[in-house]
Amino acid sequence: MTFKFKNVFLNNTATVVGPYESKGPLGKYFDKSYNNLYANQKTYEQGEAKMLEDSIDILYKKANINSADVFLSGDLLNQLISSNLAALNVKIPFLGLYNACATSMEGLIIASTLIDSGKVKNAICSVSSNNCTAEKQFRYPNEYGGSKPKVTTFTATGAASAYLSKTPSQIRVESGTIGTVVDLGITDVYNMGAVMAPAAAHTLNQHLKDLKRDVNYYDLIVTGDLGIYGKQILKDYAKEEFNIELSKYNDCGIMLYDLKEQEVYAGGSGPACCPLTTYSVILDRMKRGELKRVLVMSTGALHSPTLVNQKLSIPAICHAISLEVEK
């Protein structure tokens, strides 16, 4: 299902990251960084919430605002701990979201729909993730020191927030596609790229079909966090299933880190991975005129320990947002 938006703009963004992200190739683009995974708090969970709150504070200053009509946010933690704590402090009408690592574009679609319909004038969309909180909840705490296969993706530590409104700016939210849940029977909790790649292919095909567009309409297509192996699976799957040839394509999880120098396995993942990359280097390239049309597809593995413990496979989802430079 695809929506076209008439007058919705991405006015400002803010990004806060941890030590791995700040030392990666995109480090200079982020608004704030911490040199520890706790973000100077007592626990990893509190640290993730602090990063999320920081991103909202920075967004307020950059956008010259002190509130918004609605706040949409999501994370990976049980009952959306980080988002709930942030919502408690910002005191804006709040919608908590969960589509795993696809939450960022889910939030932009919902906010853009509300703004385009006239129900609200503006919105703040946020997400967060932390490598240590995610590993503890979904696999094993990093402190256990267990080995991981090379297909593993590395959950990004950070938070990203965006301010959307009808006020014209350089970047317009042109359209959005809501994905459908896809499950190809994969049970490997480490191979998230393989889990999510088919969902990305289905959403891409639906987006192009709904809007009657060729894949070359876009100067760049990015997925959220497939990593090096999931990226290749998507290219092969899209070609075989839908005859879509992906050439001007990259993955945010690959762009966020230096895979040769940093120990991040197959690349980045997590809800923050996609917007950290999009709101930094991709928006910078758009504002400088290098890119005019970008399709951002946030990919999410709807992984739950309950599913795995009951020997069930892992479903996935992908949502897409089309960003265009305003003429």
Image (spheres, grey):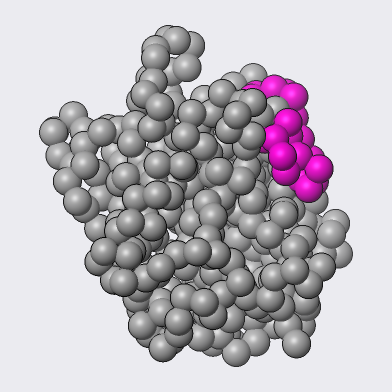
Q: Which corner quadrant holds the C terminus?
A: bottom right
Q: Is residue 32 magenta?
A: yes
Q: Is residue 326 above or below residue 228?
A: below
Q: Quadrant of the N terminus?
A: bottom left
The quadrant in which residue 77 appears is: top left
Residue 121 point in image, percent of width and height: 66, 79
Task: Answer yes or no: is residue 24 visible.
Answer: yes
244 and 112: which one is in front? 244
Q: Quadrant of residue 18?
A: top right
Q: Residue at x 85, y 57 (%)?
A: 61
Q: Which residues are magenta?
A: 21-40
Instruction: Look at the picture and state if 90 lies above or below 107.
Output: above
Q: Residue at x 43, y 50 (%)?
A: 231
Residue 32, how many percent across, how many down?
79, 40
Q: Position of residue 86 (x, y in %)?
A: 62, 46
- On the picture, is 125 further left or further right than 240? right
> At 26% across and 33% down in the image, what residue appears?
188
Q: How many numbered discs sit on the rendered protein?
A: 0
Residue 323 position, x and y percent, is: 61, 73
Q: Nearer the viewer, residue 231 or 178?
A: 231
- In the displayed structure, 34 sits above or below 119; it is above
Q: Is residue 34 above or below residue 299?
A: above
As drawn, is 2 to the left or to the right of 308? right
Q: Quadrant of residue 186?
A: top left
- Residue 257 lies within the magenta run: no
